[in-house]
Image (tube, coloured by chain):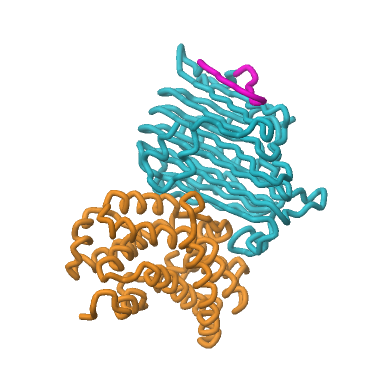
Chain colours: A cyan, B orange
Amino acid sequence: MTLISADRSGFSTAAKVGLPLSFDDQKGWDAELALEFERSHGATRLMRRHHRGPLMVQRPFHPENDGTCHVYVLHPPGGVAGGDRLDLRFTLASDARCVLTTPGAAKFYRSATGASQCNTVTVASGGVCEYLPQETIVFSGAQAALETLVSLEGNATYIGWDIVCLGRPAAKEAFDSGSVTQRIEIIRDGRPIWFERIRLDGGSPMLAAPYALAGQTVFGTMICASTDLDDTVADQVRAAVGQVKDGLFSVSRLDDVLVCRYLGPQAAAAKALFAHAWDAMRRALQDKPSCPPRIWAT
Amino acid sequence: MPAPGSMMHLLRLTSPSLPVGAFSYSRGLESAVQHGWVKDEESARAWILGVLEHSFAAFDGAILLRMMTALAAGDVGAFRRLDAWLASGRESRELQLEDRRMGAALLQLLIDLDVTRAKDCSNDQLGYTAAFALAADHWALPVGEALRGLMWSMVESQVAAAIRLVPLGQTAGQRILIAADAVLERAATHAENLPDDAVGNAAIGMAMASAWHETQYSRLFRS
């Protein structure tokens, strides 16, 4: 999968995607999951799956009238240690629709070496991929690299969020060492339509600075890439989210994407706000309400 | 006309009199003031210089350097790809519009001044940093000077906005600009040494402030 790097000379990180995994098995645990979805007989089916190491899926189900396929992605170890690399690839053929989520938070543990998770999403024309995982907790001292690379064709849609929690405030563990890098890139028909890289070092002044984290420990970015965004979408999302108590929320519609952000103390608050935003986006763009995976309630 | 590479070209390009409307944009500062994040000289200095060093230098700064390298090599395709990359990284609608309007204004000015490469790009929608790179390339400015000039013009217009918004006295504004020198030098060196995969660093609070500005009730600035 070198689609992204092939189109943009500057993106060297993306060039790593798809190269043979080179970690020493003694040091890290590589895990790989590749899922391919196709629409057939009125519903989206998981046609092919490939996994290596501790990444797997539960049996897909179809709770929506339009045949959207819901899949839980499982990482049974639950935590990611130094040297680990998680590589997830979701490929949707024309008109396929899927909702992907996870049953629990991902955790990146303290480690002297880096660990990474890379999600590669490819959606053909007419497809809709909604990637709505639980939060990622980055322990103090972890060195986490989180990447989401999305490639869309034609009028394909991607809705996705990434929620990152720094340290473990409940255990009085501040994010005072280590680092996290989050990178989200979206291209449509080879043209970049969204790029965001956020690098935060443990103990850095940016954690307290209002222009960056403003003293908060949880940040989230939710992106909706659609060719049907109109001027009212941002207002609809704003109205659906309403008054925000735990933390800060913003929404802005750019040319090619709608971006929502959360900054605050609670991953649960971020998820609740983003879930409202998701419902508004679906009503505006897909003419249907959201269908929250039951696992979110447990 | 000043000789190619003359500092006069840089002074002109970074002057507030450059007709690109820089004075009308606050880059989220207006809503940061409204939100109480920026309320005095100290918080204005921390906001402006923090965004400069940790976000602007790592994205616009680092990409300006790559654009000038591409232009020097005559690689217009790479120049356009870098512009597309930068454009896809605008954090909010207003930051996207600001970049596009200022870019269009500077590109038009360069076309009117008969800058050949600008004329070649007359059908493109370039961002401000790309238009600035065309100008710096045309007048043969050293790359490091162009980088520092671009960063200085950002700080200068942010300080002018802070003087109106916080508000601050003119002397406080000058103190921030004086303090900018050391930060700017550090940020420029950082930008010059960034590998490709470390380019870009979004400032979340600034991005959110800019998004809130879209619905702020009373506004002096366009961003």
Q: Tell me if A53 is positioned left or right of B136 in this view.
A: right
Front-most of A177 and B29? A177
Q: Nearer the viewer, residue A150 or A15?
A: A15
Looking at the image, which residue is at 60% across and 66% down? Answer: B35
Q: Nearer the viewer, residue B33 or A182?
A: A182
Q: Position of residue A124 (x, y in %)?
A: 40, 27
If the image is split into quadrants, where does the C terminus of chain B sit? bottom left
Question: What's the residue at 52%, 16% (across, down)?
Answer: A48
Q: Is residue B59 left or right of residue B109?
A: right
Residue A250 makes an appearance in the image: yes
Q: State the residue lying farthest toward the bottom.
A: B171
Name above or below for residue B10 compared with residue A54. below
- Residue A29 against residue B81 in the figure, above or below: above
The image position of residue B86, as x and y in percent, is: 40, 54
- Quadrant position of residue B169: bottom right
Placement of the N terminus of chain B among the 4 image quadrants: bottom left
Q: Is residue A290 left or right of residue B223?
A: right
**Bounds of the magenta segment:** A47-60
| Residue found at x 62% / y 64% | A210
Quarter of image, res A257: top left
User: Residue B132: where, in percent of width, then height?
Assistant: 33, 65
- Residue B160 lies, in percent from the top left, at 46, 78
